[in-house]
Image: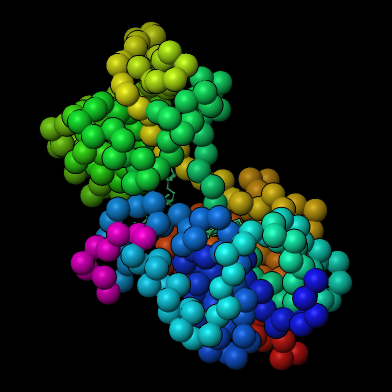
Amino acid sequence: MTDTILNTLIIGSGPAGYTAAIYACRAQLEPVLITGSEVGGQLTTTPEIENWPSRKDNPDGFSLMFEMGEHAKALGTKIVNDEVVKVNFKDKIKEITTKTGTVYKTKTVIICTGAKAKYLGLESESIYKGHGVSACATCDGFFFRNKTVAVVGGGSAAFVEALYLANLCQKVYLIHRRDSFRAEKVLVEKLKNHPKVEMVLNATVKEVLGDGNVVSGLKLNTQDGDKEIAVNGMFVAIGHEPATAIFKDELELLNDGTIKIGFGTATSTSVKGVFAAGDCADNVYRQAITSAGMGCSAALDAERYLMD
Ligand code: FAD
Ligand code: NAP
């Protein structure tokens, strides 16, 4: 247990967490930020970002998040590589316990835990997770160069993943359960015209096929009945779910696990002194820039709470 009582502890190192830290430093709150296992958050898994204002050079996600972290650090954020495993929000001074056993005491908490990749939930999928089934093309795409892969999903993430893989692989199938897409139109046009991409629409994956060690294909349920395609790997890009399990007994959550906010100020949760920002508290916009904006609001809300 640390004796110091912090002004602000920030959980998460995505765009929301780092932006909250930048604003908290400027308010002289001397924040501590706990990174979690994915330092830099979801954006670190994407090869190109086309919509971060002022960066028309389309930086890769890892570099952009590294720069954001350096900015937060330069202003005085204490960044700790650890993961929060337990929280106690019952009293005015909140307690945060980490994986390494440290217990922090703090007057305010800003939760920026973002979201985790969803999988299809098939038994055969779990057999090949980490060796043939992945949710991150930038992390694992290299293992499939000159091979054939499938990407499952119809949102922007699936399209970005498929475009990235099309540059590495011999062939990419895009498998989507409907025939219209949530993905941005510009991405849809790029992929539709890509010579290495074949779209399989109105189709779902029934089974990942293989010998138990190596993936060899997918059994699909299509409008014309079951069909098998030969692939070496499957990339699942069907969205993310909020990383909020550790808060379920302490805060009000929505049915989908999103932290409920708006109790007084935009980022206030159901517990006074606890604020939430980014994808963990937003089931509508879920963008880097909106997460960063919410991180800014949360730090300003925490500053005002501490002044009262
Ligand atoms: P996240 O980025 O999810 O970060 C969450 C942080 O919380 C992580 O650092 C994690 O380690 C930490 N954490 C979680 N649990 C704990 C815990 N228990 N203890 C401590 N820390 C914890 N958006 C765009 O605007 N433009 C794009 O081009 C774009 N491309 C994308 C491409 C892909 C492949 C994906 C998956 C998403 C993309 N997005 C894009 C969406 C964008 O990445 C998210 O909206 C944004 O990262 C959300 O930021 P966040 O700070 O809320 O959370
Ligand atoms: P998303 O927009 O929620 O799309 C998820 C896709 O997966 C949908 O097409 C959905 O199908 C499909 N899906 C969901 N569950 C499924 C299941 N069990 N089986 C088969 N398919 C399933 O998620 P996302 O693509 O991860 O994007 C998340 C957020 O990040 C969005 O706000 C997006 O704009 C943002 N993002 C932006 C960029 C960018 O700006 N370039 C890039 C990536 C992500 P249905 O359509 O039928 O529901």
Considering only vertical position in the picture, is 95 above or below 149?
below
Q: Quadrant of residue 110?
A: bottom right
Q: Where residue 122 sits: x, y (%)?
A: 54, 23
Dividing the picture into quadrants, the one containing residue 65 is bottom left
**Which image quadrant for residue 281?**
bottom right
Asked if residue 216 shows in the view, the reply is yes
**Picture quarter with the N terminus:** bottom right
- Of 25 and 79, nearer the camera is 79
Q: How is the image coloured?
A: rainbow
Above or below, 130 relative to 269: above
Quadrant of the picture in which ligand 2 is shown: top left
Q: Is residue 11 left or right of residue 64?
A: right
Residue 268 visible (yes or no): no
The secondary structure that dominates the magenta segment is loop
Stretch of the chain drawn in magenta:
54-62
- Where residue 39 sits: x, y (%)? 49, 60
| Camera-side residue of 121 and 40 | 40
Is the C terminus in the top left, top right, bottom left or bottom right quadrant? bottom right
Q: Residue at x 46, y 62 (%)?
A: 40
In the picture, measured across the screen, residue 273 lies left or right of residue 237, that is right
Left or right: 122 as drawn, with respect to 208: right
Q: Position of residue 91 (x, y in %)?
A: 86, 72
**Within the magenta stretch, is there residue 3?**
no
In this picture, is 151 found above or below 1? above
Q: Residue furthest right?
A: 91
